[in-house]
Amino acid sequence: MKLHEYQAKELFARYAIPVQNGVVIERPQQVEGIALTYPLVLKAQVLVGGRGKAGGIKLASTPDEAKRHAAAILGMQIKGEKVRRLVVAEAAEIGAEYYLAFTIDRPARRMGVIASAAGGIDIEEVARSTPDKIARGTVDPFFGFHPYQARQLGRRLGLGGSLLSDFVAVATALYRVCVSEDAELVEVNPLAVVTGRPFDAAGGPRLLAVDAKVILDDNAVYRHSGLPKNEELTELEAAARAEGLSYVELDGDLAIIGNGAGLVMATLDMVAHFGGRPANFLDVGGGATTENMKQAIEIVVRKPGVRGLLINIFGGITRCDDIARGIVDARSPVDMVVRLTGTNEDEGRRILESAGIHAYVDPQEAARRVVALVAHGA
């Protein structure tokens, strides 16, 4: 689950990570009378990267300029996502920029830490062109991440004095965010050296989290009751999740349902091999019930433009007779092809045949057939 920048910064502030003062607006008129010190920065709130290059980040020195920028950014499309909110924040006078992140290092089976003195640009490009500028490490989950480790990391970036102390405070707090909030990724890019009030009230340069990116583990969302609504999900993805189904929307016209992620992915490949365009990925999971199957069909056919449905079931703990009852009860409104084999297969086939539905045994034959049906319908 991705958080918007403003949501991530609200989270950071709770852990005493320094962020800019700012407000979230949804209409240009809300800039008027805003209680912030100019110049201001206006930043589009979307769950995709590349905002700056797309014109989604602007500086404003006056209220009129801020209002014009807000009107230009709100409603624009950035990589297919419409801008509905802006963060308006006090602009910082930025000096050096650093990169700092904690993320899951799956090969190491623990949290990894990544830092770089080349912040403010794509870390992937830094890794390709100047890998020596990146400092990496892993964190023992039993031992944790301690100030002395953060100090060692900061020194590798060339930090010293009060900036090193600030870095230690930010890095240890960022690790606490990961552990306490069940985050898969917590990233600050840039973690910037800033001067000028109100950021350096103590009289010297400070480190400030100018941007923030947080991705939370979907499997742990139930443990955090105060989380915002997941805006990554489409309406149908949210409906599927509410029913305990794994559903991802794609851009084709042929709906896919299977049991098991591997089987569904193989089905997508088969459909594409025969010239079809998958409209979704839907996994009803092991042990799917009649009701699960019925709900799955109702969800996938609700997507506009769907003209065919392929159901590929290999019954293990999933019973073919339960699946068949769900298929019959749902009454798909689009051309449907079923491949059914496994536990209680004979009973499942009998149920389908009594409703006039033929079930294939060969998945490739089923995929070829449904692609042909959709093409013929076109």
Image (spheres, rainbow, N blue to C red):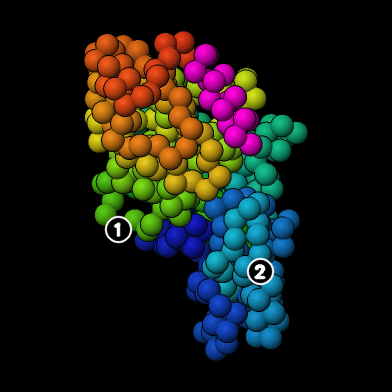
Which residue is painted at 45% across and 55% down in the image? 231
Residue 15 on image: x %, y %: 38, 57
Q: Which residues are magenta?
A: 364-378
Mark drawn on residue 216? none
Q: Nearer the viewer, residue 139 or 11?
A: 11
* In-image side of 352 versus 205 (left or right): left
Quadrant hosting residue 216: top left
Compare marks 1 and 2 and give the one earlier in the sequence.
2
Q: Residue at x 54, y 20 (%)?
A: 369
The amino acid on which the numbered mark 1 sits, given as a three-letter code, is Gly
Residue 160, placed above or below residue 268: below
- On residue 73, the disc is 2
Q: CA distance from mark 1 to mark 2?
A: 29 Å
Q: Which residue is mark 1?
A: 226
Residue 339, how many percent across, how many down? 41, 18
Classify mark 1: helix, strand or loop.
Answer: loop
